[in-house]
Amino acid sequence: MTDDSTNTAETFRPEARAPRGFADKRARDLRAERAILEAVSAVYERYGFEALDTGAFEYADALGKFLPDSDRPNEGVFALQDDDDQWMALRYDLTAPLARFAAQNWETLPKPFRRYAFGPVWRNEKPGPGRFRQFIQCDADTVGSARPEADAEIIAMAVEGLEAAGLPRGAAVLKINNRKLLNGLLTSAGAESAGQKLAVLRAVDKLDRLGVDGVRLLLGEGRLDESGDFTKGAGLKGKAIDSVLDFVSAGAGGRSATLDNIAKVIGGSAEGDEGLLELSRIDAALTSLGIADDQAFIDPSIVRGLEYYTGAVFEAELLLSTTDEKGNKVSFGSIGGGGRYDDLVARFTGTATPATGFSFGVTRLAAALRAAGREPGGVARGPVVVITFDQAHMAEYFSVVGQLRAAGIAAEVYLGTSGMKPQMKYADRRGAPAVVMLGGDEIAAGTVTIKDLDAGRQAAEGVTDNAAWKAERPGQQTIPRGELVAAVRKIIEG
């Protein structure tokens, strides 16, 4: 028999740390995300979208290109092998689970099927500043409608949803393009191989960062950057390069003017003409829905999901001026996006099923709003704290806290063992609007003493003498116990 008392081996104590890329969230963060989701959900439901929740895990083959292989079972996703030897993975986004759900339940669903969803998603990627492996996403999609007007409704709903979430008009914009225009452009530019087409699109995607001159080099033979590294270009020639640059520069002006500009440079391609017609119908629907050019405009340089989207594409860009905690300027850029993906459901059914949608990162939007000085959900107050003086009076303390809670006021009894001063510090750290005190004298007299912590702080700024402070007791009053609820509510409501 072993005597544990003689065991000199040190007890292993794991380091208390969250895994890289995973963040703990306290009440402030959760309140912000909840406020955003409640505001956005109300907008989506006004548009006739129903809520849907799917499980955190999907079979990995349902996630398309994120399917793990035998050599890299965790590539892109967090995956595990079930006891039936099938790979399951935590959902990478909310669209792939929708495609699976729609295919699985297609016979019983109303068509088109309009749904929105929100919840955590997981990505097995290298974490970095503002880049997490788990975050909250919100997604809305219409499955079963090929009409461009379905795209327009998604765009309009995204605009209204983001504004409802706390972004004032002018703080964000939806940029719209169409993959068919891009495909038509590639055809007219003479891009032949898949590699050359991809090189052209990647060059276009760098317009904001490199400018027209930099993109021109990447469309041609290539570009030498400041570090001396050479990036091979798409290999287009003079006129072809000019046509691509004319196209991506056609976005000056409102939606109608941009459509006219595109029509002048995209001609000669049936697919490009089809994309132009779809954008025209989207523009008409947006105009009817009251979405102005400053809320959503056509940007021919937008390139998203090169292997994913089949028609309209859109991206939400944050225009707010934001700073970090040190006052440094921070650019959040894109906060969401979407488009038409007509092939995703067909992966399951083999039948063409048109779909379009938009998603945004709730966690990212909350961080952006906060960086811009806008607290999502407002600044919440902590509970009223009932100070404890004597164990013998605990029944009275709980009677008081019960009285406040019954009136809908958040309240708690201090259940630590500290004295009066630490209890007041505790209430201050909790953000309590007030504390309630009752000792033996108050209990005998049927009174309570309430201290308005905000008023006390303000008064303290003008009091320099300790004796005067004790005599005046700013923000403090003793009242009959029957007036407790009314007095506390008055403090809370300001």
Image (spheres, grey):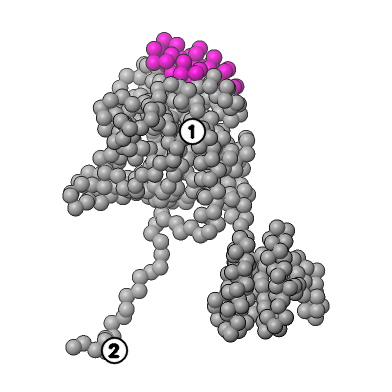
Q: Nearer the viewer, residue 102 or 107?
A: 107
Which residue does the numbered mark 2 point to in the structure image?
Answer: 5
Identify the secondary structure beneath mark 2: helix
| Number of other residues with Cα within 10 Å of mark 1, as a class: few under 14, some 14 to 19, many 20 or more | few
Q: Quadrant of residue 485?
A: bottom right
Which residue does the numbered mark 1 point to in the structure image?
Answer: 48
Q: Quadrant of residue 115?
A: top left
Identify the secondary structure beneath mark 1: loop
Residue occupying image coordinates x 63% and y 35%: 169
Query: Is residue 273 in view?
Result: yes
- Specify whether residue 45 is painted magenta: no
Residue occupying image coordinates x 50% and y 12%: 264
- Specify whether residue 267 is painted magenta: yes
As drawn, 402 above or below 306: below
Label 1 to label 2: alpha-carbon separation? 68 Å
Q: Nearer the viewer, residue 219 or 115?
A: 115
- The kind of residue on which mark 2 rests is Ser
Q: Which residues are magenta?
A: 253-281
Percent across and percent down for residue 378 are 62, 52
Percent across and percent down for residue 340 are 41, 28
Residue occupying image coordinates x 35% and y 74%: 13
Direction from residue 300 to residue 395 in the image, left or right: right
Q: Main secondary structure of the magenta part?
A: helix
Direction from residue 454 to residue 178 in the image, left or right: left
Foreground label between 1 and 2: 1
Percent across and percent down for residue 306 are 37, 30
As drawn, 48 above or below 4: above
